[in-house]
Structures are given as structure tokens and as C-alpha cells.
Image (tube, grey):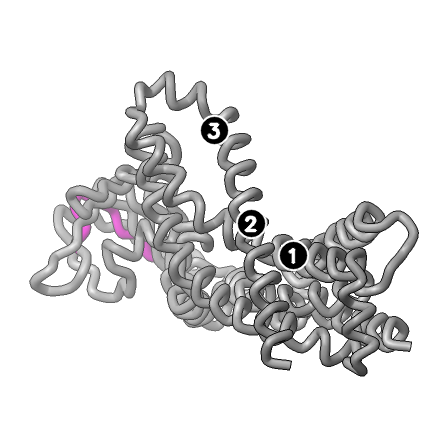
């Protein structure tokens, strides 16, 4: 059995690797054709273009791995079926469950690696990819953050019209404080021409501004040239970080960001869904193997072409399920964990029924 297991794992991994290389090359070629005009317009060197696609490849690999695993299991089992190798294996008394064991175990380790790869390696590569886009393609530039709006605490909202990253300075700042007992009632507002972070005191200082204090029927206005504001909880690095996209954050950063959102009174559901989706998407490798392998292990009219079509349809339905469940989750109708894992649970249940049917 060890010889057979090694043979199956070798054939399976070779097919996965071939699929990943093929999908990555196709993806890169298509994307390069789309961005070719941008590269030419910005006079980007060939070496920088190559570097851009090197750091883009991890994201492509993450997205294509479940598809490559599915097609690899299809190709391996389908080829063995057409060559009557599966017939010989069954004649030797080996059950379908035992035949699938090397595929499932290998897919499990692929999923574990994909969790780490998608949770830490891909975000690092995406950061560098964004840097190249900002520096050479002039896309998504953040050295001057503009129209930044976030909630600092449960009863404080900060608005920054323009943020200078190089000087850690916020320009045209507005800070609004609301009554803790009634968050629809504003009690104070600070408007300043600029605000700068004091690294020695670890606090923000506002310059050339106005402080307004609102009563039930009155308003008090005070102008100031300099005003220290120790109550603000964010730091300069947090300003641009609040504009970072989730795909640039590692699993640990996503978790911390969700906790920060909850602490400041914001809704962390979208971040929690992204966190859980990173993990659930990696383990979809096991689900697609459990679903697709029994179909490929049995000879059918139409051969590999029909099996390929069936598995492609399954993949499409799986992705639709995933997107629909995420839409419900982001609207607050489903728990973040259930939202991210719903498609896996549904298809795992279907795979178990399909496996029982195929083993008869």
C-alpha cells in the first residue's frame, strides 16, 4: 500500500503543480495585456514590470490553488480510470475510501500551507504590489491621504481633509464629540488648520483652530493658536492603516483591526468575515476533492471531458454559494464564522452523500 500511496501522491502533486503553473502563466499574460498601456504611459522599466508580477503571483496562486487541486484530482483519477488502473485497484480489494485517503491527506496539508501562505505571505506581497502601483503606475497613492473619516472612540469622530505622511501632519481637521448618553447629540467640536503628532509627549497638538461647546440652547466659541489633545487614541501610523485594504493585512493584523473596530464602536463584521474567509477558502481544497474525486473515479460516458464539465459546474456553484453567503453576512443576517464557512459546510454535506452513492 505504501507504494500505491506514494504513486498516487506523486501523480496528484505533479498535477497540482502543473495546474498552478498553467493558471498563473495565463493569469499573468491576461493581466499584462490589460495593464500594458499603463506600463507604457508611465515608462516603467522591464525589470520593474517583472518585479510587479513576481509579487502579484502569490495572490494568483492563493486563488487558483483550490481549482488546481480539484482539476488535479479529476485528472489523476480520470486517467487511472481510463487506463483501467482503478479497475486493478478495486480488484485488489481496495475500497474507494482507501483509494481517496492519500488525496484527502495531501489536500489537508495543502490547506494548512495555504492558510499560512494566504494569511501572511500573500499580504506581504500585496503590500509591495501596492507600493509599485503607487510609485510607478501612480495608482492609489497614499503619501497624501485625503478625505479620511473614522471613529476614534464610541463618542468621537475624526475627519481629516488631507494627511501628509512624510511629516505626520493632518491638515483641515475636524473632531466631533457626542454625548455618551445620546450619540445623536453633539456636545463639542474642534476645527483646526493643522494637527501634528508630538512623539515626545505621545499626543496630538492642534494649531490655529476653533473649539465649540454646545449646550441645550447655547453655544460657546473659543479660538486657539495651540491646543494639546491627549485624548485621541490613534497614532500617525494608524491614520493610513485605517485606509489599508483587508487584502494587505495578515491574519493577525485583521484580528487586531477587528478588535480595534469593536473597541471604537464600529461594526467589525466585514473584517471578521475576511478573517474567517481566509481560513475557510484554504480548506475548500479538501471539500472539492471529497466532492470531485468520486465523480472522476467512476467511468462515465463522455470520459474526462464530461467529468471536467461536471467539476467545473460544481466549482462555479461553490463560488456562487460563497458570494451569496458573504452578502448575507455583511448585512448582519449571518454570523461571520457561519458566513465564511457556509459554502464549505453545504458542499461537505453534499460530498458525503455523493461519496456514499459512488461507493455502492
Q: Secondary structure at mark 2?
A: helix
Q: Distance of mark 3 from mark 1, alpha carbons?
A: 26 Å
Task: Answer whether residue 225 is magenta in the image.
Answer: no
Tag on residue 18?
2
Residue 251: name its quadrant. bottom left
The residue that label 1 is drawn on is 72
Highlighted range, magenta: 205-213
Task: Find residue 298 and report its horizontal and vertical position in percent.
Answer: 85, 64
* Left or right: 210 as drawn, with respect to 83: left
Q: Is residue 71 left or right of residue 19?
A: right
Q: Nearer the viewer, mark 3 or mark 2?
A: 2
Dot 3: what SS?
Answer: helix
Quadrant for residue 38, please give it: top left
Q: Is residue 179 above or below residue 208?
A: below
Instruction: Return the residue nearer the eye: 170 or 42.
Output: 42
Residue 37 lies, with reference to residue 103, above or below; the image says above
How packed mark 2 is, by other alpha carbons closer than 10 Å (few <14, some 14-19, many 20 or more), is some
Mark 1 lies on a secondary structure that is helix
Disc with the residue nearer the chain's start (1 vs 2): 2
Tell me, yes or no, whether the two marked residues, 1 and 2, touch with CB atoms within 8 Å: yes
Find disc 3 in the rendering and name its residue.
Answer: 32
207 in the magenta segment: yes
Amino acid at each position: 500500500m505504501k507504494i500505491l500511496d506514494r504513486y498516487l501522491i506523486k501523480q496528484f502533486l505533479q498535477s497540482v503543480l502543473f495546474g498552478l503553473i498553467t493558471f498563473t502563466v495565463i493569469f499573468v499574460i491576461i493581466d499584462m495585456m490589460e495593464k500594458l498601456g499603463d506600463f507604457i504611459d508611465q515608462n516603467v522599466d522591464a525589470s520593474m514590470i517583472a518585479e510587479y508580477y513576481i509579487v502579484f503571483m502569490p495572490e494568483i496562486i492563493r486563488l487558483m490553488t483550490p481549482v488546481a487541486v480539484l482539476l488535479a484530482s479529476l485528472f489523476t483519477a480520470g486517467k487511472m480510470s481510463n487506463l483501467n488502473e482503478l479497475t486493478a485497484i478495486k480488484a485488489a480489494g481496495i475500497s474507494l475510501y482507501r483509494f481517496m485517503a492519500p488525496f484527502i491527506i495531501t489536500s489537508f496539508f495543502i490547506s494548512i500551507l495555504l492558510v499560512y501562505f494566504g494569511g501572511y505571505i500573500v499580504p506581504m506581497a500585496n503590500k509591495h504590489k501596492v507600493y509599485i502601483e503607487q510609485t510607478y503606475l501612480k495608482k492609489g497613492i497614499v503619501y497624501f491621504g485625503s478625505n479620511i473619516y473614522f471613529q476614534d472612540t464610541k463618542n468621537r469622530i475624526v475627519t481629516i481633509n488631507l494627511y501628509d505622511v512624510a511629516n505626520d501632519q493632518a491638515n483641515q481637521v475636524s473632531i466631533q464629540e457626542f454625548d455618551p448618553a445620546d450619540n445623536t447629540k453633539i456636545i463639542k467640536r474642534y476645527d483646526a488648520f493643522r494637527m501634528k503628532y508630538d512623539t515626545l509627549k505621545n499626543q496630538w497638538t492642534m494649531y490655529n483652530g476653533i473649539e465649540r461647546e454646545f449646550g441645550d440652547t447655547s453655544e460657546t466659541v473659543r479660538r486657539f493658536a495651540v491646543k494639546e489633545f491627549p485624548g485621541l487614541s490613534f497614532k500617525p501610523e494608524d491614520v493610513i492603516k485605517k485606509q489599508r485594504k483587508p487584502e494587505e493585512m495578515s491574519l493577525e493584523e485583521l484580528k487586531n483591526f477587528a478588535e480595534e473596530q469593536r473597541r471604537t464602536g464600529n461594526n467589525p463584521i466585514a473584517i471578521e468575515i475576511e478573517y474567517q474567509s481566509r481560513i475557510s477558502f484554504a480548506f475548500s481544497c479538501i471539500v472539492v476533492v471529497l466532492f470531485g474525486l468520486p465523480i472522476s473515479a467512476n467511468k462515465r460516458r463522455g470520459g474526462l471531458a464530461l467529468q471536467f464539465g461536471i467539476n467545473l459546474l460544481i466549482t462555479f456553484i461553490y463560488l456562487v454559494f460563497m458570494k451569496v453567503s458573504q452578502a448575507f453576512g455583511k448585512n448582519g443576517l449571518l454570523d461571520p464564522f457561519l458566513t465564511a464557512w457556509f459554502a464549505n459546510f453545504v458542499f461537505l454535506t453534499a460530498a458525503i452523500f455523493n461519496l456514499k452513492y459512488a461507493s455502492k
